Amino acid sequence: MSESIETVRNLGPKTAAALADVGIHTRADLEAAGAVEAFIRLKARAGNVSLNALYAMQAGLMGVDWRHLPDEMRAALREAAAAAAS
């Protein structure tokens, strides 16, 4: 059985609940969707979702603190999210 989304590093209870609302219940679900797709789903549902959620999900999948995500990776995530949203 896959690890619950609530246990993924960097994800607080509000983000975990929002992810569950868009069909992402486990770490495996997040891995399968990817941070960018999960972010797009959250934005489509709630609209006002911070880029920090995107960074937190990616960093959580990597097992690092979201504040330590390299600037280059943040930029790549922003570009991918913008491309996926259009």
Image (spheres, rainbow, N blue to C red):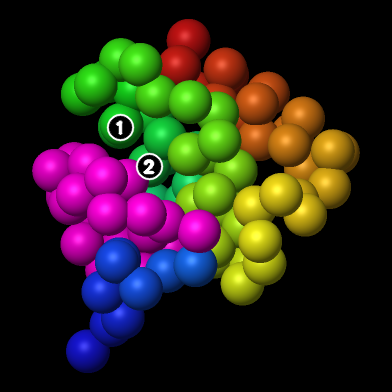
Q: Which structural element holds mark 2?
A: helix
| Kind of residue sitting beneath label 2 | Ala
- Residue at image mark 1: 41
Query: Eyeballing the image, is 32 above or below 75?
Result: below
Q: Is most of the magenta stretch helix, strand or loop?
A: helix
- Residue at image mark 2: 38
| Kind of residue sitting beneath label 1 | Arg
Residue 36 percent location from the top left of the image: 50, 39
The span picked out in magenta is: 10-32
Residue reaching furthest bottom?
1
Q: Residue at x 48, y 26 (%)?
A: 50
Q: Is residue 23 magenta?
A: yes
Residue 17 percent location from the top left of the image: 19, 49
Marks 1 and 2, how far apart at CA: 5 Å
Residue reaching furthest top?
86
Q: Residue at x 26, y 74 (%)?
A: 4
Of residues 67 and 3, which is closer to you in this image?
A: 67
Left or right relative to 63: residue 16: left
Mark 1 nearby-residue class (10 Å; few <14, some 14–19, many ≥20): many
Q: Is residue 39 visible?
A: yes
| Dots 1, 2 in contact, CB < 8 A | yes
Could you tell me how many numbered marks the image carries? 2
Left or right relative to 36: residue 79: right
Residue 78 percent location from the top left of the image: 65, 26
Mark 2 nearby-residue class (10 Å; few <14, some 14–19, many ≥20): many
Q: Quadrant of the N terminus?
A: bottom left
Q: Residue at x 27, y 54 (%)?
A: 13
Q: Is residue 19 visible?
A: no
